[in-house]
Amino acid sequence: MAIHQSMDFFRRWMRGSSPRPTIRYRGIHAYMLVMRPQDILMPVPAGLCCKPGGFHIDPVRPVERALITHGHSDHARAGHGAVLATQETLDMMRLRYGENFAGATQAVAYGDEIRLGDVTVSFHPAGHVLGSAQISVTCKNTRIVASGDYKDARDPTCAPFELVPCDVFITEATFGLPVFRHGDAAGEVNKLLASAKLFPERAHLVGAYSLGKAQRVIALLREAGYYAPIYLHGAMEKITYYYQERGIPLGELRPVRGMKKAELAGTITLAPPSATSDVWTRRFPDPVTAFASGWMRVRARARQGGVELPLVISDHADWDGLTATIAATGAGEIWVTHGQEDALVHWCKSKGLAARPLDLVGYGDEDEGETAAVTGEAQPAGEAQPVGETKKP
Amino acid sequence: MNRFAELLDRLAYEPGRNNKIRLLVGYFRETEDPDRGYALAALTGALSFKHAKPGLIRDLITERTDPVLFGYSYDYVGDLSETVALMWPKAGANYTEPLLGHPSPQPSPARGEGAQPSCSPHSDVEVTDVGEGRTCGRVPSPLAGEREGEGYRGQDSSEIPRTHNNPPPPTLTDVVTTLRTLGKAELPAQLARWLDELDETGRWALLKLVTGAMRIGISARLAKTAAAALGDKDAHEIELMWPGLSPPYLDLFAWLEGRGDKPVNSDPTPFRPVMLAHAIENADFANLDAADFSAEWKWDGIRVQAVAGRDARGHIQARLYSRTGEDITGSFPDLVPSLHLPGAIDGELLVLRDGRVQTFNVLQQRLNRKVVSPKLIKKFPIHLRAYDLLGDDENDLRELPFTERRAHLEAFVAKLGDPRIDLSPTVPFASWEELAAARADPKSAGAGDDADAVEGVMLKRRDAPYLPGRPKGPWWKWKRDPHIIDAVLMYAQRGHGKRSSYYSDYTFGVWTRGEAGDELVPVGKAYFGFTDEELLQIDRFVRRNTTEKFGPVRHVVHEPDQGLVLEVAFEGLQRSPRHKSGVAMRFPRISRLRWDKPPREADRLETLERMLISMTGS
């Protein structure tokens, strides 16, 4: 019997559990006999690594095989050898990065089981954006669910969150503080419509992440009975039209490009958040700046960004959603990724659940990657002219 | 209460004055009596009840939530009322409840009926749909569309009423009238009940209201202007009758909506709308005859209206108003005894020490104090310099020409015979040239040692009545030339509202000797003074010459040979330990862009130091 100790087990994130040596018996790794969750999935600099399956989940660096939960740029990056994801996520990556964003791709339907190495994986709706998935990884009798970003609130633009019972639940904590309670998104959209009614001579600019949030806001506006054309910032067009192609009804959409200032009075335009404080806004008549985000719940946050009409609409679970979901999975162990980990870990422990933060880096900015497109549009005519010579002393 | 809270919430984000008025008018139109009247009272600071202490609020929340989670949350949000409003648990929730029987989880305490799973990964039973719209177990989930409206959470389960006999959320009237009479011991329980009944915004507004911390960026004047707009009236009319009105202003709203007579002001000390002057331009003098005008010094203090009158029992009442009609009597109790004769004086508040008028810098130290202590009163003795008399015991004098009012004023001040109140002296002149000379050197033209507190001259037509507002022609202000320095643009920040896409707030600096040779030290910040065209030019310069970005702030290149020199005009200087440079400017603005000047030729801190010494003698 050969006994081999590996320093791998002394990783920082394992605080609280006693390290054990790797045991080999006739060439078989002991983890295949006595499975521990951290033997199945482990955080490494590239992301969540599944050694027995030979893949990473949402890697932030190029890897050989990647399983991607959803299309936001902080989770879905280009340059992997092979990518397994839902059809929608693959399509979104193609839209963003071009045809050759990965060496090979494979689409997976929600619920299909796929064997990878020593593990079985399956994808389940996460309710975050179109095509978003939680990834279930089962090895022997242990199931871990990496939920990616998720929400349990209603969203007419994507499949609803599916609860997957598991032993270990990996949850995000973007809004992991009890002050984040998102409330009813329809009510927030009504705020927007009331403002549009009160200020018919002004344009309403709604900052929203261009993948998911924008389309959800549009769908909610339609549900609220707003049937006028809705205008789109250039960076929104491709992805929004893709949603329409997938059969999600969004009504009449128009590019804002080329519109005259006066024509935009009384209209609603969706734009990436960074564009709403840019020179780009000068084409609108006295614009009211709205921003649709869970962050808008906190007034100081909203005011910092110069937002005049904060709309609390989030594609992430709020505090009640996080805690209810964690409880409902039945998992005895909770790993908490990006966001307000401390508070959520504390809550789990107070409920008798084993919990620890997974110190993963590189997640949490969905708007990343859109800035280039925005500033590209933002250059006003005449920007290249020299200044300063006209003024005399 | 929820509707009022919505209004406050929206006002707090709206930067534009006219848009704020629109929001307010909309509220007054849609809201019924007496709620809108109490709202107007809350906005004008006319409500009075004992405020709740922050400690009480903190106790309420720590009884109901995990203190550790509250700590994290407060730390994140940074505002007690808002933190409590956001994390206030739904009625009936109990945070100490554990997840019983884990790993067969029980309903989450926070989540009502939407959270009722009974699926366990360790049981062999294949569980499918459990509860409302919840999916559990491995159910192949179709794409969007087919199950639309069937979220995991169920259809807004959080919005389902808790029980059948919930009381409706309190109205603003409920809150205000209850708080007036509520005993201290009953307050915590009453607050908790309201917090249970209100939504998030309602809770936030309630807590702001009861802790007396309602800062929402609108003045009493703006609220009155909006009320006036409801009835297409002039805000001055409301200002005139305001002291005679009391919440919830049923008579006011009846009049505004054309359902009732104009309320009569029976107040013995009413405010009269103030007359203001236009700034005179050089070209204006050609059309003006010096003989038509009387001149006096423009004192650099606070314009006020001091009104005394007899109440129903014949006792003298006195009030001090700001030029917008706000009652500021409470800040200057030391002046009240001097106002012992019925009359309305238009004048300037100044600080006098040993008969000498102090500069605005000194007066400023008496302003905006929560408590006016005897020490403060002694250190900054207040004085009223009288410009005009609008009325006396019997008559409204405003229709009289200035010369006649002046005669009444002189007699009135003499009759008062009070050392705290004196006349603003006239400045004799025969021609505009003579007046220009006096303006250039007030010290030798009669102002003497008080010259430092003179900020120019006022011209008043001898035949003009006292008119509200800023009529063009009868009154002119001819301000002293501002101080000027050349400074270098160092940082730029985006503006607010209409200017949110422009870098319109500028921090500028002057040269000083540093450890490694000459360096720029910031001396002030300005965000106006330039034309729209100049704003575009500076904005373009900032965007192209940014060296670093810190959130909304950009560092702009400022090297001896590279950068933008701004000519900055300002009214005064004072020492300031809060600024790195040790000096602070009063009323700084950009007067010119010096594209022609290399930054190394901008002014030095020593220049400001010298100006400071000549201005204050310190």
Image (cartoon, rainbow, N blue to C red):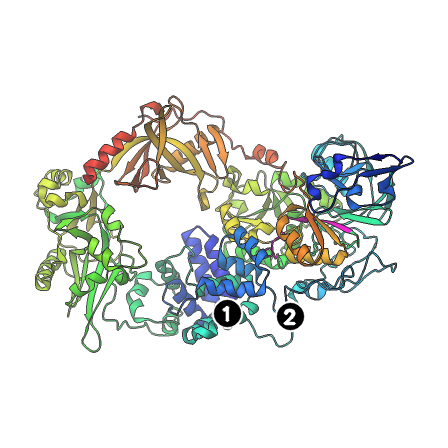
Which element is circle 2 on? loop
Residue A205 location (% of width, % of height):
55, 47
Q: Are marks 2 and 1 in contact (CB under 8 Å)?
A: no
Subunit of mark 1?
A: B
x and y, in percent, of residue B11 in the image: 46, 56
Question: What crowding class fits label 2: few (fewer than 14 Cα within 10 Å), some (14-19), or many (20 or more)?
Answer: few
Q: Chain of mark 2?
A: B
Q: Give the extent of the magenta segment.
A: A168-181
Q: Residue at (22%, 32%) from the top-left corner?
A: B610
Q: CA distance from mark 2 to mark 1?
A: 20 Å
Tell me the quarter of the picture where residue B518 sits: top left
- Label 1 crowding class (10 Å Cα cut-off): few <14, some 14-19, many 20+? many
Q: Amino acid at mark 1?
A: Leu
Which residue is the site of mark 1? B191
> Which of the marked residues, 2 or 1, is nearer the chain's N terminus?
2
Q: Identify the residue under disc 2.
A: B161
Which residue corresponds to the image point at 9% horizontal and 44% vertical from the top-left? Answer: B446
Q: Secondary structure at mark 1?
A: helix
In the depicted structure, whether residue B290 falls above or below residue B535: below
Q: Which of the 4 quarters of the picture holds residue B320? A: bottom left
* A172 inside magenta stretch: yes
Residue A35 seen by the camera: yes
Q: Residue at x 45, y 32 (%)?
A: B555
